[in-house]
């Protein structure tokens, strides 16, 4: 493609939904110039993709948008739990779970919490903040074609408003262009997995009287199981705006045209058990639940993220959260390579880390749909689980046995049965409340733009706590950062006067929380995952730390 280049950017993002917008936000936070193109004219108008899990909210917290998101989500802040009922007015009702975080136990693991924020409310927040960070985001603009070579990607984009075409030259391309991804198809990347699971038609509607039938039951979703009219009911404002997901069977010859307004109104009335309720249908959109994971997460300088890389059953909202976490994983690695402090091979760890997580998570999402008897999903529940089974091992406990980590157990599964956040390489770093210069923060607030080395306060002045081995971890970190030109922040943690960070709880030991010793150290990546952990002092900590960073960042020079 020998064409005139109109725009040059380090990263081109294709797709401006949740994942593409998150990629823009994360790259902007890291100072990476980029261009995002989205074929639709604006952000989503449909209230879907509402469940933002704890890990996603941790990422948004670090990116400085958590509070804005919670404000956008305030109307549903009191909604918790999943209800299953024959109808809203009948006696057959059961809470599959009533509280997302009963007893507040989640606070032990995270400074953040779940947030119910519909996609149509969340996307404008991400868009606004991405633009404030300098991101260039063009709507009504589609990708027409692209080619790549050893040095970058050349893409042709087209304005759907004016018809103008421009040629963009980028170092890398992120394809966040949905489950039917044209970019993935152009790369010839296939899928693996069971495939289609079920189909629904999502209806938005107004029905002020429905609030009386719902009463004080503030659910996230209610599965209505009347065999003559089953479906899933979701509140939009708890007053008059609602969403209903009705099963759709195209395999039986049923078409979207069959879902007339009259049929939808009658279905909603029968499902809810309010036969004379006034219902105004305001929108209809088909969606397809599937379990698929791309066989590769990219090719060359082009990477897949979100639905272009994986499709999951909607139960548990795993799909959008996994996609946002894809973007976060990829963003810091692109920043490192583009910044010259990591080798290009670091980007190979994106697939090595994220693909196994998607495979395990998509299987869990399908199991969850079976456990909840999701309308339209005709499969027997999997034994050994249950509607009240925990999600935290999937949400917070996923790990990277292989990838940009040093010393991880490569044989461990990406998702275990129990949640363990003890500072093991490849896991999300533990959460602790700390004080720093009088301000309260979580350990997780430290991780975004650089590697972070945590060690005991004994070596703050260059000593080693009496080991007789010379300088300690904290003392050598600046020299390592300078020699490697790697962003590396080092903090000493403890209760003494020389500590940079002081645990808020007087009896809490940072080393115990991180699975090491007072003379050890923990190296955390910019995405908050533990890259490496030292059990104690070594003879030459500077060389040791340098070798670890070289290995993790795939530096060969």
Image (cartoon, helix red, strand yellow):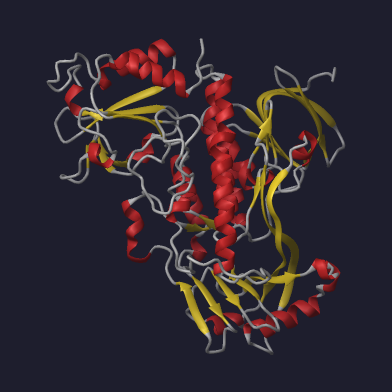
Image quarter hosting the N terminus: top right
- Identify the residue shown where x is 19% and y is 34%: 494
- Report the front residue among 264 and 381: 381
Q: Is residue 133 visible?
A: no
Of 93 and 171, the residue lying toward us: 93
On the image, the x and y values in percent for residue 420 come to: 36, 48
Q: Residue at x 17, y 18 (%)?
A: 463
Q: How many circles with numbers are drawn on the protein?
A: 0
Q: Is residue 516 left or right of residue 136?
A: left
Where residue 254 appears, as percent x and y from the top left, is 83, 70
- Kindly tell me whether residue 210 is visible in this rendering: yes
Does residue 69 appear left or right of residue 451 in this picture?
A: right
In the displayed structure, 476 sits above or below 256; it is above
Q: Position of residue 399 (x, y in %)?
A: 46, 42
Q: Nearer the viewer, residue 466 or 325?
A: 466
Figure quadrant of residue 546:
top left
Determine which quarter of the picture holds residue 479.
Answer: top left
Residue 449, by quadrant, is: top left
Q: Is 403 on the left or on the right of 229, as rendered?
A: left
Query: Residue 148 at x, y = what percent?
Result: 75, 23
Residue at image location 75% in from the left, 63% down from the top: 285
Question: Which residue is at a point 45% across and 18% down the rendered structure image?
Answer: 550
> Is 67 or 426 nearer to us in this picture?
426
């Amino acid at each position: 493609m020998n064409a005139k280049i109109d725009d040059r950017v380090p990263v081109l993002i294709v797709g401006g939904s949740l994942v593409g917008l998150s990629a823009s936000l994360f790259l902007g936070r890291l100072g990476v110039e980029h261009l995002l193109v989205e074929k639709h004219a604006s952000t989503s108008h449909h209230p879907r993709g509402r469940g933002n899990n704890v890990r996603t909210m941790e990422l948004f917290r670090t990116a400085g948008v958590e509070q804005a998101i919670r404000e956008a989500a305030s109307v549903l802040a009191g909604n918790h739990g999943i209800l299953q009922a024959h109808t809203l007015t009948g006696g057959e009702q059961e809470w599959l779970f009533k509280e997302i975080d009963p007893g507040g136990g989640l606070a032990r693991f995270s400074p953040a919490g779940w947030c119910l924020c519909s996609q149509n409310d969340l996307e404008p927040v991400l868009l606004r903040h991405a633009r404030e960070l300098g991101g260039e985001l063009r709507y009504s603009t589609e990708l027409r074609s692209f080619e790549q070579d050893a040095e970058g990607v050349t893409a042709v984009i087209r304005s759907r408003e004016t018809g103008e075409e421009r040629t963009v030259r980028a170092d890398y391309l992120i394809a966040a262009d949905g489950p039917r991804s044209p970019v993935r198809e152009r790369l010839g990347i296939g899928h693996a997995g069971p495939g289609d699971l079920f189909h629904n038609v999502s209806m938005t509607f107004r029905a002020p009287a429905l609030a009386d039938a719902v009463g004080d039951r503030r659910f996230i979703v209610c599965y209505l199981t009347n065999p003559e009219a089953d479906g899933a009911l979701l509140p939009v404002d708890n007053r008059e705006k609602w969403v209903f997901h009705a099963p759709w069977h195209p395999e039986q010859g049923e078409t979207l045209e069959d879902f007339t307004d009259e049929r939808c109104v009658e279905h909603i009335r029968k499902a809810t058990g309010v036969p004379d309720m006034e219902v105004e249908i305001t929108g209809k959109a088909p969606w397809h639940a599937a379990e698929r994971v791309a066989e590769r997460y990219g090719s060359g300088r082009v990477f897949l993220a979100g639905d272009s890389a994986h499709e999951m059953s909607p139960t548990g909202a795993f799909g959008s959260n996994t996609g946002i976490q894809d973007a976060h994983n990829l963003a810091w690695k692109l920043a490192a390579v583009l910044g010259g402090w990591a080798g290009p091979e670091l980007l190979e760890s994106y697939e090595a880390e994220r693909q196994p997580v998607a495979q395990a998570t998509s299987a869990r999402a399908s199991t969850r749909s079976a456990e909840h008897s999701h309308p339209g999903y005709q499969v027997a529940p999997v034994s050994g689980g249950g509607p009240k089974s925990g999600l935290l091992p999937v949400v917070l406990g996923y790990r990277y046995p292989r990838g940009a980590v040093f010393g991880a157990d490569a044989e461990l599964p990406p998702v275990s049965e129990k949640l363990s956040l003890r500072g093991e390489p490849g896991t999300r770093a533990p959460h602790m409340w700390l004080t720093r210069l009088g301000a309260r923060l979580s350990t997780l607030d430290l991780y975004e733009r650089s590697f972070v080395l945590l060690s005991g306060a004994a070596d703050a002045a260059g000593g080693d706590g009496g080991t007789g081995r010379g300088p300690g971890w904290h003392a050598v970190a600046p020299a390592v950062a300078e020699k490697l030109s790697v962003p590396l922040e080092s903090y000493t943690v403890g209760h003494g006067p020389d500590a940079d960070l002081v645990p808020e709880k007087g009896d809490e030991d940072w080393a115990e929380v991180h699975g090491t010793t007072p003379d050890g150290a923990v190296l955390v990546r910019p995405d908050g995952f533990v890259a490496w952990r030292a059990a104690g002092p070594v003879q030459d900590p500077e060389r040791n730390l340098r070798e670890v960073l070289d290995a993790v960042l795939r530096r060969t020079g």
